[in-house]
Every structure is written in structure tokens, then in C-alpha cells.
Amino acid sequence: MLYLDDLAGDDLVRHLQQTSQTRVHVERTREAVRRVRARNDFGTRNDLGVALLRHGRTTAAIRLFLLNERLRPGRYETATNLGTALELAGNDAAALRW
């Protein structure tokens, strides 16, 4: 277990920044889920997919981006986000196609 008393200087700053960023990402993900539940459309699914990527949930994000492509084909947002997700999942050949 990590205690803040064990950190100093740059290590403490890095830890506090990471913790703060994690909280922001968690809140953004929760907000994206709320929006998808309220209004399940292209934009809200796209936002949720991006939030999932930030949390390392690439498979779930890929599913959302593929759903967006099926329902609204040819959108550049889908291509860029799906390409990024596929690259993060280690599927470079498919990522390059997107």
C-alpha cells in the first residue's frame, strides 16, 4: 500500500496529478453513461467509447464504435476512434485500415 507520507518532491506531484486525472476520467465516464442512458445516439455512444478507452476498456469501446459505424456509416469520428481502439488492442493491421 502506498502512503502519501512515503512520497516527496516530483514523486508526490506525479501521484497527486494522476489521482486527480483519474477522478476526472471516472466522473467523465459516469457522465457519458448517464447521457447514453438518457439519449442513446451517435454522439453519446462516441463519448462513452472514448471514456472507456481512457480506462483501458478497449473491447467495450470497439463494440460501441462498431455499433456507431453500423448505424451511421462513414463518420470520421468513428474511423479515428475505432482506429485508435484497434491499435491499443494490438490489432495494427485493422487499425491502419480505419
Image: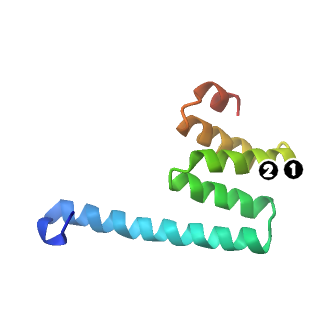
Residue 82: x and y, percent? 67, 42
Mark linked to residue 81: none
Let me know if residue 91 appears in the view: yes
Is the residue 62 above or below the residue 93 in the image?
Answer: below
Residue 46: x and y, percent? 71, 56
62 sits left or right of 89 in the view:
right
Is the residue 98 above or below the residue 9 in the image?
Answer: above
Is the residue 82 above or below the residue 98 in the image?
Answer: below
Which residue lies under the disc numbered 2?
68
Image quadrant for the N terminus? bottom left
Q: CA distance from mark 1 to mark 2?
A: 5 Å
Residue 45: x and y, percent? 73, 59
Instruction: Check disc 2 and give the amino acid type.
Output: Asn
Residue at the (63%, 24%) spot, across then down = 93
Image quadrant for the C terminus? top right
Mark linked to residue 71: 1
Could you tell me which secondary element the residue under label 1 belongs to? helix
Label pair 1/2, CB-CB below 8 angstroms: yes
For the residue pair 53 and 96, the one nearer the viewer reads as: 53
Instruction: Check disc 1 and give the amino acid type.
Output: Leu
